[in-house]
Amino acid sequence: MEETDLAAPEEPVPVGFEIERRDDYGRYLIRARAEVVAILRLLVQRKSLISAYFNDRRSFLLTAILEVDSQAGELIIDCSRDANINRQALLADRLTMTTTLDKVKVQFVLGRLDETQSGGLPAFKAAIPAEMLRLQRREHYRLTTPISRPVKLQTTIRRPDGSALAADATLLDISGGGIGLMATPLLAGLIARGAVLGNCKVTLPEEGLLVADLGVRNRIEMTTRGGARYVRLGCQFIGLPGIRMNMVQRYIARVERERKARLSGLA
């Protein structure tokens, strides 16, 4: 049986398009211009990374807001190092932007982009959005796994001819509901949306071996600032027993405590 690797992540990719589901999340929409601008400026100050999805969600750009000009009604965002992705983004009628601010999901939609410059470097500009979603409700806290201590997943998939292929994957994130995996386009081509990955093995540091079945719920193409292309596979736990769910929750709680201790200078 051959072995292959899913690509190690360079940038986490937060996933979510609640802003399109008005019936469920309309109450979280912000339409006051001053409040929208204030949040945009806070994103600039925090240098927050923002995921921009376009081309019917098939394409992805990792960016950041560089400037906000409330008088001109414009904001400037960073562009990619990948010229092809930049061309695709300029052709898009709309881009769905998603990020987090103080662990709260923030989403907004931009219209057509135009080319501009910021600090002498290429950039994009767009109209300030008329509304923004600030989602404080979370069914599952999603932890971005530490880059310094990557968490691996091992599973076996089947090729179209029925032969087995061993895959060694790196997790992008984990929650009580599932995990995010990073795959090369070649490997992702063998894993369809709706597929079930059985008997997946994840070694959670200081917790032990987690064995679970995963259902592939979404696939999103992405490109890092370095120009590398990947496919993020969003996977949901299937029938995860309570004892294994406790492992996941303990791991998430411990890593989060360690991060807070480092930020406070206690570790």
Image (cartoon, rainbow, N blue to C red):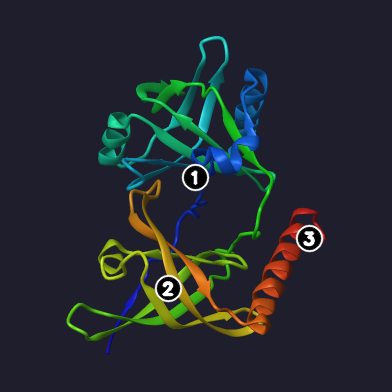
The residue mark sitting in front, 2 or 3, is 2
The percent position of residue 214, horizontal first and vertical second, equals 46, 74
Which residue carries the number 1 mark? 17
Q: Quadrant of residue 133?
A: top right
| CA separation in Å, label 1 and label 2 | 25 Å
Label 3 crowd (10 A; few <14 / some 14-19 / many >=20): few
| Residue positioned 38% across, 21% down in the render | 116
The percent position of residue 191, horizontal first and vertical second, equals 31, 69
The answer to the question of whether label 1 and label 2 lie on touching residues, with beta carbons closer than 8 A, is no
| CA separation in Å, label 1 and label 3 | 32 Å
245, 156: nearer the viewer:
245
Horizontal arrangement in the rendering, residue 23 relative to residue 87 (left or right): right
Label 2 crowd (10 A; few <14 / some 14-19 / many >=20): many
The answer to the question of whether label 1 and label 3 lie on touching residues, with beta carbons closer than 8 A, is no
For the N terminus, which image quadrant? bottom left
| Residue positioned 31% across, 29% down in the render | 90
Horizontal arrangement in the rendering, residue 143 relative to residue 81 (left or right): right
Q: Amino acid at mark 2?
A: Ala
| Residue positioned 50% across, 55% down in the render | 12
116, 19: nearer the viewer:
19
In the image, residue 12 above or below residue 200: above
The percent position of residue 166, horizontal first and vertical second, equals 33, 83
Which structural element holds mark 3? helix
The residue mark sitting in front, 1 or 3, is 1
| CA separation in Å, label 2 and label 3 | 28 Å
Which residue carries the number 3 mark? 261
Which residue carries the number 2 mark? 169
**In the displayed image of the protein, which residue is found farthest to the front?**
23
- The number of callouts visible is 3
97, 87: nearer the viewer:
97
